[in-house]
Amino acid sequence: MDNGKNKPKSDNASKKKTLAEDKAKRIRSGNMSEEKVEGGGERIYTIPLRNVKKAPRWKRSNRAMAEIMEYLKQHTKSEDIVLDATINEKVWERGSQKPPSRIRVKITVEEDIIRAEFVE
C-alpha cells in the first residue's frame, strides 16, 4: 500500500528553469519586442512632478518637461518618444514658475515611436 511517501515531490525549480529558458529563446530570436508591443499598445501614466519644486522658480516648467521625458524613457524603455503639444501647453499654462504637481499622459506605441498626449 502506497501512502505517498515514496512519491517524488513536484519541483518548482524545474518549472522556473523552463520558463527562463523559453524567455531566453524569445529574446535571442527577437520575438520579445513584438510581444511587448502587442500587449501594451496604449497605457495611461500619472507622472509625479514633485521634484520640480526643488528647481529655481524660473526653471520649474523647463524642469517639468525634462522630468516627463525622463519618466517616459524609464517606463517605456525607449529613446524615441514624441510629446504632443497639449502636454507642453498644460505644463506652461500657469507660467514657468507654477507647473502642475502631477500630469496624466496616454502613450501609444506605433512601430518604434512612442507618442504621448495629455489626458484630462
Image (spheres, helix red, strand yellow):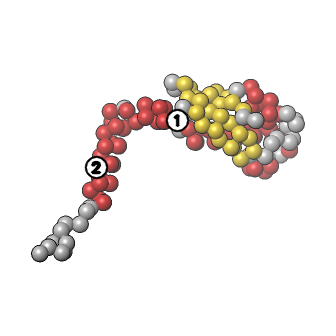
**What type is the residue that disc 1 sits on?**
Gly
Circle number at residue 7: none
Q: Amino acid at mark 2?
A: Thr
Sequence order check, earlier mark of 2 and 1? 2
Q: Measure the C-alpha gap from mark 2 to mark 1.
A: 25 Å
**From the viewer's perspective, is residue 114 above or below residue 76?**
above
Whether residue 12 is visible: yes
Q: Residue at x 23, y 66 (%)?
A: 9
Please state the horizontal and vertical placement of residue 41, each as a whole percent of the image.
Answer: 54, 31
- Say whether marks 2 and 1 touch (CB < 8 Å): no
Q: Name the residue carrying label 1.
A: 40
Q: Position of residue 27 (x, y in %)?
A: 36, 38
Residue 113 horizontal side relative to residue 99, left or right = left
Query: Among all residues in the image, which is located at the extreme front?
Result: 1
Q: Residues within 10 Å of mark 2 (few under 14, many from 20)?
A: few
Name the mark on residue 18. 2
The answer to which image quadrant residue 96 occupies is top right
